[in-house]
Image: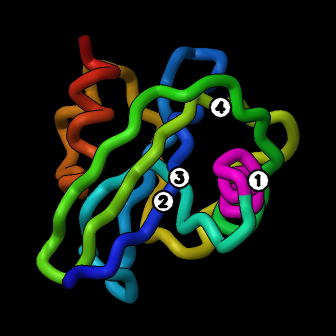
Amino acid sequence: MKRRIRVVAAVIYNEHNQILCAKRSAEMSMPGKWEFPGGKVENGESDVDALTREIKEELQCEIEVERLITEVNHEYEAIIVQLVTYAAKIMKGIPLKSEHEKLEWLTLDQLSSVDWAEADLPTVALLAK
């Protein structure tokens, strides 16, 4: 039986209506794939607390989580990922890459120009509508 993990991700908008996208580094699983920043929800942690913590760890920023966008279950070869995405905005700090190879602000029209991790594709499609 495959292991299930709950993951939260932030669709972070800036003042130009661009979305912060992150390219996975060579040291991460699925290297080179793009994703919305975030991470695993720890035991006893709410989605919002986990997302706030992950963004602070990954990007050195403080965010405000605004609303749920969607929830997706995606089955990879080894695990099942329950990915929950939320709209968010940066309240303090400038995003700095610490784990990812690259961070980029993309417009809605540009989202389809990068190679997304499969679990993120439903969110990308929803945003592009």
Residue at x 31%, y 44% (from the top left corner): 72
Residue at x 48%, y 31% (from the top left corner): 19
Tag 2: Cα neighbours inside 10 Å, few (<14), some, or many (≥20)? many
Amino acid under label 4?
Ala
Amino acid under label 3?
Val
On screen, residue 54 versus residue 86, left or right, reads right
For marks 3 and 4 on the same chain, the one whose residue lies earlier in the sequence: 3
Residue 54 within the segment the image draws in magenta: yes
Mostly what secondary structure, the magenta segment?
helix
Query: To which residue does mark 3 refer?
Result: 8
Label 2: element kind = strand
For marks 1 and 4 on the same chain, the one whose residue lies earlier in the sequence: 1
Amino acid under label 2?
Val
Label 4: element kind = strand
Query: To which residue does mark 2 refer?
Result: 7
Label 3: element kind = strand
What's the magenta region?
46-55
Residue at x 33%, y 83% (from the top left corner): 26
The x, y position of residue 35, in whole percent, is 37, 53
